[in-house]
Amino acid sequence: MKRSDGLHLLPAIADIAAPDWDGLLDATTDAAPPCLRHAYLASLEETACVGGRTGWTPAHATLWREGEAIAAMPLYLKHHSYGEYVFDWAWAEAYARQGLDYYPKWVSAVPFTPIPGPRLLGRDTAARSALLEAVLAHVRASGHSSLHLLFPSDEDAALLRAAGMMMREGVQFHWQNRPPHAASGTAEDCSGPAASAGWADFDAFLASLSSDKRKKIRQERRRAAAHGLELRWLDGHAAQPAHWEFLWRCYAGTYALHRSTPYLAPNFFHRLAQGMPSALRLLLASRQGEPVAAAFFLCDGRALYGRYWGTLEHLPFLHFELCYYQAIEYCIEHRLERFEGGAQGEHKLARGLGPVRTTSAHWIADPRFRRAIDDYLTRERLGIDGYVDELQERSPFRQPVTGS
């Protein structure tokens, strides 16, 4: 559909053709995670995970010149703060105490997905900057409380800082496919050539850990293996509808254990497999041919992204095996650069995943709250600095031997 020049907010990702959206994503970076692709966002909308009464109202920002999209941003009008992984509940409560409305707010993010990546998609830096300027102008005119860009790439963060947005830091845990102090390489696809400094196998990775951590991991893997389960990796081409139905049972069961409601619809995984099968990885654990547990990942040419897991039985240490150790082995075998373990979880540190800083950017309309939040973020960053230093001191890797 040909549109006039300027900013257009789209109520559905289907209102822009997949090649146009994905072309902007590919022009922005060659390392964008799969969750930013048109098919992923479309799967969320088509299965009603967002839209309707979910509190996530799609309003994807697109900038057009001469009938063509030159920049885009995944954008939602939010009526709550669920599913974001950057916690601003205290800000909303402060607004409420003053009799002000914090919701709705504008959020640029991948729903329910704390995977860092570009949020400003565009042909070049000038187009991305122009999109950000246009979105900020629209947000100011909308009368809503705020705009938040969650888990942007480093390149985006530089543009967001230059635009005067307040930056917030967080910490995730990622596994890197390289021995400490070695340079990293790249891979072209999930079965591509080796990263230049990757580990030869899981035992080589274990050998780089301190003896107590190495012993602990071996014990946990023996305990998980004692359950006698068959483990099998499937991609979106090989997995059948019954596999996706089982995964959703596991996924929903995990939420139920935490007395929470799952965000994703029962048909989401099946729809996603139809739209982008090459980017999906399903790890099934079965007993005598019957599945008892599953873990779900996204995959691209450089990384494996841990997303969901669940089990029908309580099987000690199976979570660590499926969600971490098997994922690490997969990355080593397929020469991927890293495994992203998702949000939070200090227990990941002892299993070889290291701390990685993340960012988010925030624009607050009310000048009083803007000053208060800016002061809070300054103090919070000092706490993050200390936290990362503490985590690095607790590194599970053996310390290098230095000369005298």
Image: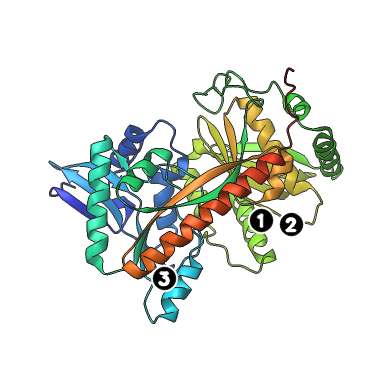
Sooner in the amino-acid sequence: mark 3 or mark 1: 3
Please determine whether, in this image, residue 268 is positioned above or below residue 327: below
Residue at image mark 1: 250
Going by the numbered disc 3, the residue's amino acid type is: Arg
Classify mark 2: residues with Cα within 10 Å, few (<14), some (14-19) or many (20+). some
Tag in front: 3 or 1? 3
Sooner in the amino-acid sequence: mark 1 or mark 2: 1
Going by the numbered disc 1, the residue's amino acid type is: Cys
Name the image quarter holding the C terminus. Answer: top right
Classify mark 3: residues with Cα within 10 Å, few (<14), some (14-19) or many (20+). few
Q: Which mark is residue 53?
A: 3
Q: Which mark is residue 312?
A: 2
Residue 130 located left or right of residue 79: left
The answer to whether mark 1 and mark 2 are in CB contact below 8 A is: yes
Please determine whether, in this image, residue 130 is positioned above or below residue 145: above
Q: How is the image coloured?
A: rainbow
Q: Residue at x 20, y 52 (%)?
A: 7
